[in-house]
Amino acid sequence: GAKADAGVAIIEVRPGSPAAMAGLAKGMVITHANGKPMKSPADLQKALAAKPLSKGILLIVRTEDGNRRVLLRVDG
């Protein structure tokens, strides 16, 4: 998968989930969420809880091809 000095590795993405629909995949590394660096799964959980998914969470993910911005949002 992707190489990163820090971040939260994606180890599974459920088919049909908001993460899958946003283009997230196993092997990517989430390095930032809402502009804050991610150092642990707990950091990511805090970022996801801080803002409703209906408003969207901006993620920066490291892929094998480099960094990518992903908006994770659930309509509702």
Image (cartoon, grey):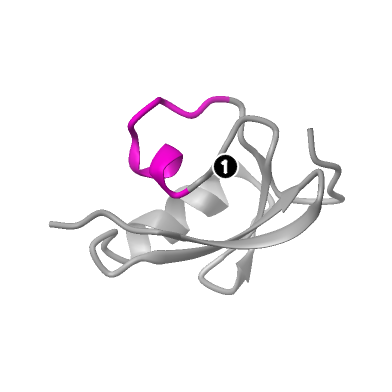
* Image side of residue 53 versus residue 31, left or right: left
Where is 35 relative to 23, above or below? below
Which residue is rendered at x = 79% and y = 51% of the image? 6
Specify whether 1 is left or right of 73. Answer: right
Instruction: Name the residue at 87% across, 50% down.
Output: 5
Query: Residue at 69% of width from left, 52% of height from top?
Result: 39
Q: Is residue 20 left or right of residue 76?
A: right
Query: On the image, numbered disc 1 is attached to which residue?
Result: 41
35 left or right of 6 in image = left
Q: Residues within 10 Å of mark 1 (few under 14, many from 20)?
A: some
Report the amino acid beneath label 1: Pro
- Whether residue 13 appears in magenta in the rendering, the answer is yes
Q: Quadrant of residue 16?
A: top left
Please say if 31 is above or below 55.
above
Q: What secondary structure is the magenta-colored segment mainly?
A: loop
Q: Position of residue 48 (x, y in %)?
A: 40, 55
Which of the two residues, 7 or 21, is positioned nearer the viewer here? 21
Closer to the camera in the image, 44 or 2: 2
Locate the C terminus by quadrant.
bottom left
Question: Residue 28: horizontal and vertical position, in percent?
Answer: 68, 40
Segment tinted magenta in the rendering: 12-22
Between residue 35 and residue 42, name the one nearer to us: 35
Instruction: Please report the residue visible at 48 percent of the width from the left and 29 percent of the height from the top.
Output: 13
Where residue 56 appears, x then y in whole percent? 35, 66
Quadrant position of residue 9:
top right
Q: How many marks?
A: 1
Residue 16's place in the image compared with 61, above or below, is above
Quarter of the image that includes the N terminus: top right
State yes or no: residue 20 in magenta.
yes
Q: Position of residue 44 (x, y in %)?
A: 52, 51
